[in-house]
Image: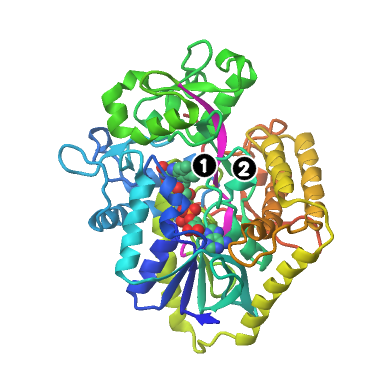
Amino acid sequence: MIHHDVIVVGGGLSGLRAAIEAKRAGVDVAILSQVHPGRSHSGQAQGGINAALGNHPDGRDDNREKHAFDTVKGGDFLVDQDCAVQMAEDAPRVIYEMDHWGCPFSRFEDGTIAQRPFGGAGFPRCCYGADKTGHYLLHTLVEQAYRLQVKMYVEQYVASLIVHEGVCQGVVAYDMIRGGFEAFTANAVVIATGGAGRTYSNTTNSLISTGCGMFMAYHAGVPLKDMEFVQFHPTGLYTTQILMTEGARGEGGYLINDKGERFMEKYAPKFMELAPRDITARSIQIEINEGRGIGGKGYVHLDLRHLGAEKILERLPGIRDLAIHFEGVDPIEEPIPVVPSQHYWMGGIDTDVNGATVMPGLYAAGECACVSVHGANRLGGNSLLETIVFGRRAGAEVVRYLETLTDRRPNARSAFAAAQMMEQKVEELGVREGKENAYELRAVMTEVMKDHFFLFRDEAAMREGLERLLQVKERVKNINLRWTGSVFNVDMIRTVELEGMVDLALCVAVGALERQESRGAHFRTDYNTRDDLNWLKHTLAYYQPDAAGPRLDSKPVTLGHFELQERKY
Ligand SMILES: Cc1cc2nc3c(=O)[nH]c(=O)nc-3n(C[C@H](O)[C@H](O)[C@H](O)COP(=O)(O)OP(=O)(O)OC[C@H]3O[C@@H](n4cnc5c(N)ncnc54)[C@H](O)[C@@H]3O)c2cc1C
């Protein structure tokens, strides 16, 4: 059994930033991560991070209030407005902090941090480092964590929480290198495990974005919030769904249909290609569904050719490489085939503005959390911002929490029992007679999510999807674990996490069926308008061990800063 004051699960931007904040306050903090922190999904982020710095010549009138308003409107007013105001307020400070820590942001001629236009924003406020912003931010924080000597346990798969008398006191982790489960006790745990994109087959997300932290918290009794709101990015590569950043449109790229039209003119005449993602993704899908995909096929074109080779090579070199290697298309010469693809999880572990959950000792930050600053639709550039702003806030809150504790000794018996339970569970999986295969079932689940809970939803299709998910949940009970070796058993990890992923999928399904309106990314063809009278509220999903799906509840949205209005772009 290993003990630290604070354990952070996940070494992406949010986990690193939380750990750095706690460590700077003198707390003994350790990060546990399935992969080396520098390989977290944060490193894939391309386009940029928002802050109202007003550096761009067209952005001089920008300010924090306007950033907060764009965020609230972008989220179709399901955003907790106090949280959006706080994020916009903290944004310039965290950007300058990253700058001072050595993050190589792109620059304007006058030496200020460069900013580009992004979707749904009234001003060019997205700070970037070419099209590798996430990589630069992540490595800057990895360096800081090393400098501060934050303890890192890498290739540790966290499988469950240790909860003693309703208080979180650590985690149980599978040591991938040495084999076996170990209890890590702590006085506080911060979950920072990222999104759950891998529950969809058509996703831009990394293989490890499986929502582990969300279902661990959910299974321990903490509610998940607004899970029906899943973001579909307008431009994934046609054959692999690898992301083509919104920055490509921010730099002036066009979306073109088979008739050669910039079709966004019909859907968002003012913002055009830089309308919020939900609107742009649906517009693309309408073009495809109505036969105006390129050559009648299931994609449209992202055309960058008019930007010229110099601009593409300077601002979008990574996009060009990806298009060449994965789609066989050089954007300098040819337009890129793109399709809407699952991208981001607006919902997640219900937290307050400092990352605290309802369970004492348990905190969450980043994509796995729902603060909520994205409401029904996240604006591009606001997620990287969220990870750093709320990672930092969660780290600070944990330090305050530790100061209130009188007894700092986690219960060893509970910790030991939790580790033993995981050992037993895996042993049972290995000797089961079941005939089901985890990979086949995962494929069924991810296709159901793509086919039934994608851009356009309706009662009949969702009911059918729910039925199919319930069947998957039954079949998961009969999975037979093929490989039972103790070292680097990825087979075991994929099997154990499938159960949790199906539960997350069920939260999406049940929440989406329940919400009889269209708001942001949740669009129902049978209830195609926003209904503030009945649905201006957050959905809370609670785990029910004895039932197939979640119990739903709701809680009010925090208003007070901005008036509700119709969303037009
Ligand atoms: C391709 C792509 C491009 C993007 N571009 C942008 C952009 O330009 N701007 C923007 O604002 N947002 C962007 N986003 C979104 C943004 O990058 C993510 O939401 C954000 O980086 C998530 O950070 P995180 O810290 O929450 O988690 P991640 O960076 O996903 O890190 C999760 C960490 O948790 C660990 N982990 C997970 N499960 C376990 C477990 N069971 N046990 C132990 N460790 C575990 C992983 O090892 C990893 O270290 C993009 C997302 C993608 C996929």
Return the mark for residue 532. Answer: 2
Identify residue for label 1: 564
Q: Position of residue 290 (x, y in %)?
A: 63, 17
Relative placement, left or right, of 343 versus 386 is: right
Q: Secondary structure at mark 1?
A: loop
Mark 1 Cα within 10 Å, few/some/many (few <14, many 20+)?
A: some
Per the image, is 369 magenta?
no
The quarter of the picture where residue 110 lies is: top left
Q: Which is nearer the eye, 207 or 566?
A: 207
Write the start and end of the magenta stretch as one range: 336-354
Q: Magenta includes 338?
A: yes
Residue at 67%, 53% (x, y): give it. Answer: 501
Q: CA distance from mark 1 to mark 2?
A: 9 Å
Give percent across and percent down for residue 149. 34, 72
Q: Tell me residue 220's x, y (percent).
A: 66, 68
Q: Observer-nearest residue: 382 or 9?
A: 9
> Which residue, as the protein is rendered here, is positioned at the far left?
110
Q: Is residue 149 left or right of residue 371?
A: left
| Picture residue at 48% right of the left edge, 60% below the top | 365
Q: Quadrant of the N terminus?
A: bottom right
Residue depicted at x 66% and y 60%? 492
User: Mark 2: which secondary structure?
Assistant: helix
In the shown orientation, is residue 413 left or right of residue 306?
right
Q: Which residue type carries mark 1?
A: Leu
Q: Nearer the viewer, residue 406 or 554?
A: 406
Q: Amino acid at mark 2?
A: Asp
Whether the residues at callouts 1 and 2 have beta carbons within 8 Å, the answer is: yes
Placement of 148 over or under 553, stated as above or below: below
Disc 2 C-beta below 8 A from ligand 1: no
Q: Secondary structure of the magenta portion, mostly?
A: strand
